[in-house]
Image: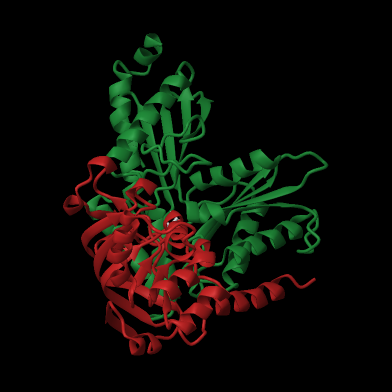
């Protein structure tokens, strides 16, 4: 292990990584990414001044500024911490997990995260956001790159609750096993959610996979930037078209009515069994807390 | 239309509010989430067993806060970490936005009529039972901006007391004083619900988008 650390410039991995992780959590919880803030600002310009929709967007933007200035959590629901780690060969994922867990517990002590892990049956709160192997959720991927990258998403409970998985064909929604069928269930998900996921939100849509991989992928797309587009042009076009259609529903910020129901749609394609055609929709609230830590040659970059 | 109001409210204040109006609310209110709703019903409304001396004392403290007062659906993030050593005069709310209200639909109307609550504050709106209770009491449902936890925490001027802290910090009942808490009326005492209106409109729009 030591050799690997030296090779990557980490003589002292635990200590340096620990404080970098704590800073990653602080940044994620208190500072909305610039692409999301820009999108909210653009949205406010489309709403009628004085309308409930524009008041709501205004409050979101003021809240964003205040949280950044005072380094306090944007939203009291600091949600499920989802970590996506890409590491060069040779790292111990067991060690990385333990570093992450310690940082999560410390961030909870510092009130950067609300104690959110309760026992499924007794409801008892563990007090430190640690809850066995599923909390925090950590995904590891090995990379050829020599940097260690740790992405963090904080996904709130309100928006998690409005996610949904559909199985095509869906007779009620007249949704067949084709792209128009997918479009119908996506619009249904937005309609069902109304403002409850703290609209305007972003949809992660996974087409295909099995039940579990489909949910996984529908969240992993939240690592993408709001202003990027899918590499395949015909899928990128769907992201754009379905977004425009969803915004015609008029649900608006917080469900107060208005032009901005969604800020974006991100699609993932997964190969599936011929027998199953799942479409999974995850909803990310406007408090879209996503940050990245890149560690290379002893340098930590936060973005 | 902006209403600047201070708790406890008078019936005429309530009746003057209509959906889509903005409100800046001041005064002392109570945070109540899922576990506490259930507890209030079981202890003071269904009372299968007579309340204990401790429970009676809580009832005496909370009744005047609730009478013509407000319940806020919120599980705050606070400055103190160790609840066992918590000193109430050192507690600050760091982030305190609304939580989803519909989970309390089965409980809210019973608590509203038992304690004569004039205002519910939360997010996402509530259903027919609560809307009826808003007409009967009279009362309004105020929608706070979900996610605006830092902004709302700034309106919290004082944290007076906490009850049932054994439920955990988010689920405990906190008595707080707020100044100019911003919200929008989405269910009024005249039977109107903005949530119902937006749901109806969006259903019609969805139908147009999915005609075969
Ligand atoms: S859905 Fe998001 S913004 Fe809304 S309360 Fe939950 S975490 Fe906060």
**x and y percentages locating residue B12 in the rendered image:** 35, 90
Scheme by which the image is coloured: by chain
Does residue A234 appear to the left or right of B64 in the view shown? right
Does residue A251 appear to the left or right of A272 in the view shown? left
Q: Residue at x 77, y 60 (%)?
A: A175
Residue in front for this viewpoint, A234 or B45: B45
**x and y percentages locating residue A249 in the rendered image:** 60, 72
Q: Quadrant of ligand 1?
A: bottom left
Q: Residue at x 62, y 66 (%)?
A: A191
Furthest residue in direction front, as rendered: B50
Question: Chain B in the picture: what colour?
Answer: red
Furthest residue in direction left, as rendered: B89
Residue in front for this viewpoint, A122 or A143: A122
Residue A284 shows in the view: no
Q: Is residue B42 above or below residue A275?
A: below
Q: Quadrant of residue B72?
A: bottom left
Q: Quadrant of residue B182?
A: bottom left
Residue B107 shows in the view: yes
Q: Is residue A110 above or below residue B130?
A: above
Question: Chain A in the picture: what colour?
Answer: green
Tally of numbered discs: 0
Q: Residue at x 47, y 80 (%)?
A: B134
Residue in front for this viewpoint, B61 or A303: B61
Residue in front for this viewpoint, A149 or B167: B167
Q: Is residue A15 above or below residue B45?
A: above
Q: Is residue A103 above or below residue B144?
A: above
Q: Residue at x 34, y 13 (%)?
A: A6
**x and y percentages locating residue A17 in the rendered image:** 33, 27
Q: Quadrant of the C terminus of chain A?
A: top left
**x and y percentages locating residue B69 in the rendered image:** 33, 74
Q: Quadrant of the N terminus of chain A?
A: top left
């Amino acid at each position: 292990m030591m050799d690997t650390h030296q090779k990557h410039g980490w003589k002292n991995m635990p200590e340096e990584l620990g404080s970098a992780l704590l800073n990653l959590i602080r940044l994620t919880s208190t500072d909305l990414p610039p692409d999301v803030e820009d999108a909210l600002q653009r949205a406010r310009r489309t709403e009628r001044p004085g309308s409930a929709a524009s008041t709501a967007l205004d409050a979101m933007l003021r809240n964003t500024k205040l949280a950044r200035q005072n380094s306090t959590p944007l939203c009291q629901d600091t949600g499920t911490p989802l970590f996506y780690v890409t590491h060069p060969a040779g790292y111990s994922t067991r060690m990385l997990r333990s570093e992450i867990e310690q940082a999560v517990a410390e961030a909870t002590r510092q009130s950067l995260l609300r104690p959110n892990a309760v026992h499924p049956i007794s409801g008892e709160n563990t007090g430190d956001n640690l809850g066995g192997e599923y909390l925090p959720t950590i995904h590891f991927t090995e990379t050829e790159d020599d940097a260690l990258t740790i992405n963090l998403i904080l996904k709130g409970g309100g928006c998690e609750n409005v996610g949904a998985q559909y199985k095509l064909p869906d007779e009620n929604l007249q949704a067949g096993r084709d792209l128009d069928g997918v479009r119908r269930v996506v619009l249904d998900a937005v309609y069902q959610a109304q403002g409850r996921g703290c609209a305007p939100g972003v949809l992660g849509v996974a087409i295909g996979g099995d039940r579990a991989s489909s949910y996984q992928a529908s969240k992993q797309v939240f690592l993408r930037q709001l202003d990027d587009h899918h590499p395949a042009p015909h899928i990128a076009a769907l992201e754009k078209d379905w977004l425009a259609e969803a915004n015609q529903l008029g649900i608006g910020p917080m469900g107060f009515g208005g032009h901005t129901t969604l800020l974006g749609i991100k699609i993932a394609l997964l190969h599936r069994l011929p027998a199953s055609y799942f479409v999974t929709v995850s909803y990310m609230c406007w408090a879209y807390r996503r940050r990245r830590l890149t560690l290379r040659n002893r340098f930590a970059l936060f973005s | 239309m902006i209403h600047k109001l201070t708790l406890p409210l008078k019936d005429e204040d309530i009746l003057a509010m209509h959906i889509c109006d903005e409100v800046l609310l001041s005064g002392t209110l109570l945070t109540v989430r899922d576990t506490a709703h259930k507890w209030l019903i079981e202890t003071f409304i269904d009372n299968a067993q007579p309340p204990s001396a401790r429970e009676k004392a809580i009832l005496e403290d909370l009744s005047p806060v609730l009478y013509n007062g407000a319940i806020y659906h919120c599980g705050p993030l606070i400055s103190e970490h160790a609840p066992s050593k918590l000193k109430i005069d050192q507690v600050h709310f760091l982030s305190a936005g609304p939580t989803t209200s519909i989970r309390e639909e089965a409980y809210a109307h019973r608590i509203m009529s038992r304690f004569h609550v004039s205002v519910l504050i939360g997010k996402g709106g509530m259903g027919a039972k609560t809307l009826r209770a808003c007409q009967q009491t009279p009362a309004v449902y105020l929608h706070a901006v979900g996610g605006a936890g830092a902004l709302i925490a700034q309106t919290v001027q004082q944290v007076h007391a906490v009850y049932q802290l054994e439920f955990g910090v988010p689920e405990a009942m906190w008595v707080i004083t707020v100044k100019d808490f911003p919200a929008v009326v989405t269910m009024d005492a005249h039977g109107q619900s903005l949530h119902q209106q937006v749901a109806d409109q969006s259903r019609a729009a969805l139908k147009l988008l999915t005609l075969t």
